[in-house]
Amino acid sequence: MNRVLATGLSSARRIWTAYTIEVLKAARLKFTYVGPALVVATVCAVPLLYTLERDGESDYAFIARATPLALNVVGVFMLVIFSSLLVSTELASGTVRFVLVRPLRRHEFLAAKLLLGMSYAVVLAVIASAAAWAIAGVFGDLKGVTYGGEVLYTGAAITFAYGFGLALGLFPLFAAVAYAVFISSCTRSTGAAAGTSVGVFLVVDTVKSHVGIDKLLFTTHIETPWRRFADLCDGIDPGPWFGAATWWCLATSLASFGIFVVIAGYLLARRDLHA
């Protein structure tokens, strides 16, 4: 038992070391900052479609529109592109052969890459949230949701619902990371990895309803985390916190994450890195 624990701790330390190195490498790349910049630009553009005024009316609806638009449209594509380059870049340059002699096992290498992609997802989510709330707070009113002078939902209730949506919304984003890393493990070409990741994502998302598989894909449920928050902002009772929609979002995201990680791990384990 002690030997197993020691082996697990040793592996965790190697993964953490590899992850910190990956973070430092990503921080030096200009492309890393394109995603956050586009997410902020998207949030800043939403007031062109939704007028913010200090008129005593709640402007939480702006946040309900800006956050999903920034994260689930612009953010998810930047996340897929970023994650699709994580493994393919190492394969293309051949540096993966040197990385794996530290020693760092292949599954630990994969784990570090996944953690980096997931961290990028969290960063995009936090930046999008901060930008949306900041703009709404400066140019609009955030005093709870009222109707006819009666307070339907307090600011605290709205904030809690937003936090719930933000936390749940990370699961589809993590699934997108695993998907892109899986594609990245299939090719040595960074261009092919990025193009294939985005292309397949768009094609599958377009045809899924026509072939009857839409409910089984995490992309179908990517908007689910924000529906409760949007309903509260409109003064509508959103129903139970963990309804069927929430469970479908969690189940499809976790299943997709697991499947893509297992396949990516298998591909890396079988791959001849010297070819």
Image (spheres, rainbow, N blue to C red):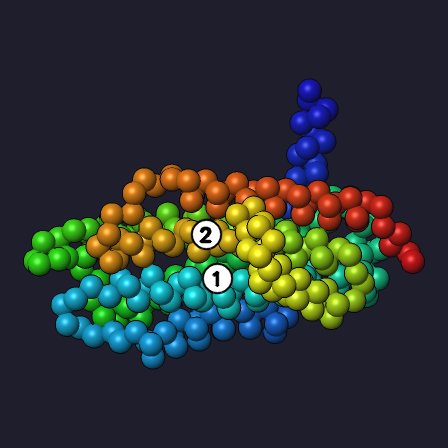
Q: Quadrant of the C terminus?
A: bottom right
Mark 1 or mark 2, earlier in chain: 1
Left or right of 16? Residue 187 is right
Q: Is residue 54 visible?
A: yes
Quarter of the view holding residue 67:
bottom left
Residue kind at label 1, given as amino acid type: Asn
Instruction: Name the residue rendered at 14%, 68% in the picture.
Output: 56
Nearer the observer, 148 or 263: 148
- In contact (CB < 8 Å): disc 1 and disc 2: yes
The residue tagged 1 is 72
Quarter of the view holding residue 9:
top right
The residue tagged 2 is 169
**Are there few (<14), some (14-19), or many (20+) residues within 10 Å of tag 1?**
some
| Disc 2 secondary structure class | helix
Residue 252 placement (x, y as % from top left): 55, 44
Residue 120, compared with residue 161, is above or below; it is below
Furthest-right residue in this view: 275
Furthest-top residue in this view: 1
Left or right of 113? Residue 267 is right
